[in-house]
Image: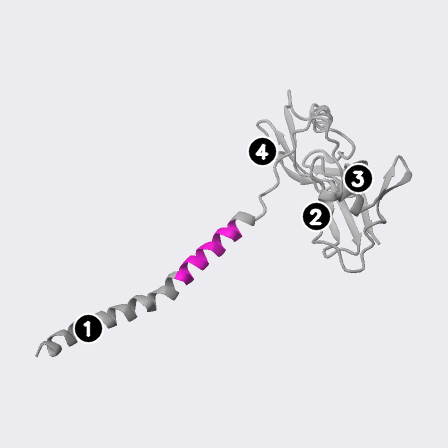
Amino acid sequence: MRKWLYLPAAISLASFSMWVQAQEPARDSVKSESATALTARDITPQPPKPNDDPNYLIGTEDVLTVDVWKEPEISRSVPVRRDGKISLPLLDDVAAAGLTPTQLSSEIVDRLHKIIVNPRVTVIVTQMGSQRIYILGQVTRGGAYPLVPDMTALQALSIAGGFTPFANLKKIYVMRNESGQDERFQINYKEVVAGHKPEQNIHLKAGDTIVVP
C-alpha cells in the first residue's frame, strides 16, 4: 500500500525535473541573444564628432554646417566639392578648401554684406572626409581609413585586419607627398614592435599611404 502512495509523488517530481531541464536551453538562448545584442550595440561606430580645431584646414569631401543667424533659407549642411568649393543660396560658389572655418565664415560674411544687414555666420566642420590615410599591399583589409588625431603607423596597420602570410614586415613604408615632394619612410615592423626603433613608428598625416610589400 505504501509503495502505491509514493508512486504519484515520484512521478510528479520526475515530471517537474524534466520540465526544469527543458527550460535550460531556452534560458541559455535568451542569454546568448542578449550577449549578442549587447556586443553589436557596443561595437556600433559612433557618429563623427564636429571638429572644433580653429586651425583646421578645410579639405575636399569635408562636410560643413553653415549657420547664418536668422537666415534659415541660407543656413544648411554642405559638402566641399572636389573643386574645393561649396554652394550656398544667394552666393552660388564659395571657395572653402584651404581655409579655416573662421576664415570661411569671414569670407561668407563679406559676400553677404551686399545682401543682408549685419550678417552673422558660423561654420562648423561636421565630417572630415578629407582626412584619410590609405593602406595597400599584403594586409587583410586594404583601403582608405579616417585619420584619427595623433594616429601612428602601427595604429593604422592594426585596423587593416592583420597581414597576409606573404607580407614582408621588414620593408613596410609610408609614402607622403609634401609641398610637391615625395617622401618615403621605412618601417621595420618587427623591430618597432620589439621596441628597438620606435622612431620609425611615425605620426601619420592626411593623404599618407602605407604599403606592405
Task: Tell us which disc is closer to us: 2 or 4.
Answer: 2
- The single residue placed furthest to the front in the displayed view is 2
In the image, residue 42 above or below residue 26: above
Q: Residue under circle 1?
A: 10
Disc 2 is placed on an element classified as helix
Q: Nearer the viewer, mark 2 or mark 1?
A: 1
Q: CA distance from mark 4 to mark 1?
A: 78 Å
Label 3 sits on residue:
196
- Magenta segment: 28-41
Circle 3: is it few (<14), some (14-19), or many (20+) Cα within 10 Å?
few
- Residue contact between numbered discs 2 and 4, judged by CB atoms under 8 Å: no
Extreme residue in the left direction = 1
Measure the C-alpha gap from mark 3 to mark 1: 72 Å
Instruction: Tell which circle, 4 or 1, labels the residue nearer the N-terminal end.
Output: 1
Residue underneath mark 2: 158
Give the amino acid at mark 1.
Ala
Q: Nearer the viewer, residue 99 or 109?
A: 99
Type of amino acid under label 2:
Ser
Q: Determine the CA span between mark 2 and mark 4.
A: 44 Å
Label whose residue precedes the other's in the sequence (2 or 1)? 1
Q: Earlier in the sequence, mark 3 or mark 4?
A: 4
| Vertical placement of residue 130 versus 14, above or below | above
Give the mark nearer the N terminus: 2 vs 3: 2
Could you say which disc has been placed on residue 72 in the image? 4
Q: Please name the predominant secondary structure of the magenta segment in the image.
A: helix
